Amino acid sequence: MERAEQVRVLKRLMDHIDNGTNVDAGGIRHNPAEAYTSPDIAAREWESFFRSHPQIIGLSGDLPEAGSFVTHNDFGVPLLATRNQNGTFRAFANVCRHRGAIVEETSRGKKNLFSCPFHAWTYSSEGKLVAVPKEEHFGAIDKDCHGLVELPAKEHCGVLWVHPQADGQLDVDTLMGGLTPEFTAWDFASLVYIGDDTYETPMNWKLAIDTFGETYHFSALHKNSLFPFFHGNVQGYDIYGRNHRMALCTRGIDDLRNKPEETWHINDGAFPVYYMFPNVQVNVGQATVILVRVYPHGDDPDRSFSRISFYARPDALDSGDNTIAELATRFAEIIRDEDYAAAASSHRGLRSGFLKEMVFGRNEPALHHYHNTYRDALGMEPLPLEEA
Ligand code: FES
Ligand SMILES: [Fe+2]
């Protein structure tokens, strides 16, 4: 985040505190319960947002060196992502060209050759087929035509993007929505991956996104966890194309007023959280960054899971309070045990059939923005703004 923007955001938060105001969506919106419960909408979202839309699979630190790889199957594509010998990020369908077996089952590691467990066809980190055992028995095949199917992949200001379809378009400028300078200034590319966690939750995937979309709940739901450290009813909000940035206001901002402006750092008084369409939250702390990727289980509207990846600034690795165990525990106690538990409770309530719709307040502009973004992407009418 550039300096001038850090100061602008901090000053705006101070103004809100001084004037007793908050961000304002200009009205309220009602969102139909079926947005969370309809199998039809869930199927369209799975197809449009996960099977046909570029995905953030992690940050540069997930592939720290030549030969690093990660695999997963989170959006329905068995994925093998590698960093080749030149340091270039590549992505492939993790599917053997012989008879379709999954080539690499390990979730991450370092390897230059990937040998299929079925008959040991072997591929390089470039996806090239380099060995076919007993080729004189099998028959001569053109190895150049039997490499792993490559997927569009781009490493952009520390973010790893993949398109799930081999012929998909990956236009990072559009995907970033103007956030490239800000992400570059954060130097996400230098972050070190330190571990991950997964939360399985009986709720629609958008309810997980929703819980990151407002701070209105801090004084109630997080009364004993976050609220002592945050001004709950004050936040910053800015839109970047289909993405947005929230600035949660920490109580550290009260001390900043007495310090010279040129010494201010955004994390002294705020905690930026970026939402990247369709399913990613980037939580940026002073020493650590936590990436949250939320996925439905295919077209099931009632179940979702979140992949939580933890990264640290290289100079913070030895500070002691950023160990993966400590970070993962702290994050799970708040996000999994408070936010997601409340969101799953919303899902049960919506499933009860008693509500036709839920309400987004004036102080919850993120919910207005991305629910209308989702609707627009599915060709649905926007939720109308109502005076309140
Ligand atoms: S399926 Fe992979 S080597 Fe046969
Ligand atoms: Fe929360």
Image (cartoon, rainbow, N blue to C red):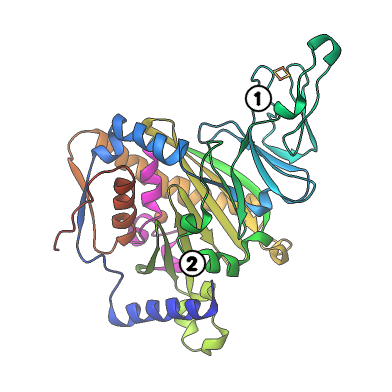
Q: How crowded is mark 1: few (under 14 residues within 10 Å), some or many (20 or more)?
A: some
Residue 126: image x %, image y %? 74, 39
Q: Which residue lies furthest to the left in this view?
A: 387
Amino acid type indicated by mark 2: Phe
Q: Are marks 1 and 2 in contact (CB under 8 Å)?
A: no
Quarter of the image containing the N terminus?
bottom right
On residue 232, the disc is none
Residue 222 among magenta residues? yes
Query: Which sits earlier in the primary sequence, circle 1 or circle 2?
Result: 1
* Residue 345 lies in the magenta stretch: no
Residue 359 in percent (x, y) is at: 22, 52
Residue 150 shown left or right of residue 341 in the figure: right
Image quadrant where one finds the C terminus: bottom left
Which quarter of the rendered image does ligand 1 occupy? top right
Residue 134 visible in the shown view:
no
Q: In this view, does 95 lie above or below 308?
A: above
Residue 124 or 293: which is nearer the viewer?
A: 124
Q: Which mark is residue 102?
A: 1
Q: Residue at x 78, y 50 (%)?
A: 86
Name the residue tied to disc 2. Answer: 271
Inspect the image, locate mark 1, and give the three-letter code of the amino acid beneath it.
Ile
Helix, strand or loop at label 2? It is: strand
Per the rendered image, the range of residues in magenta is 203-231
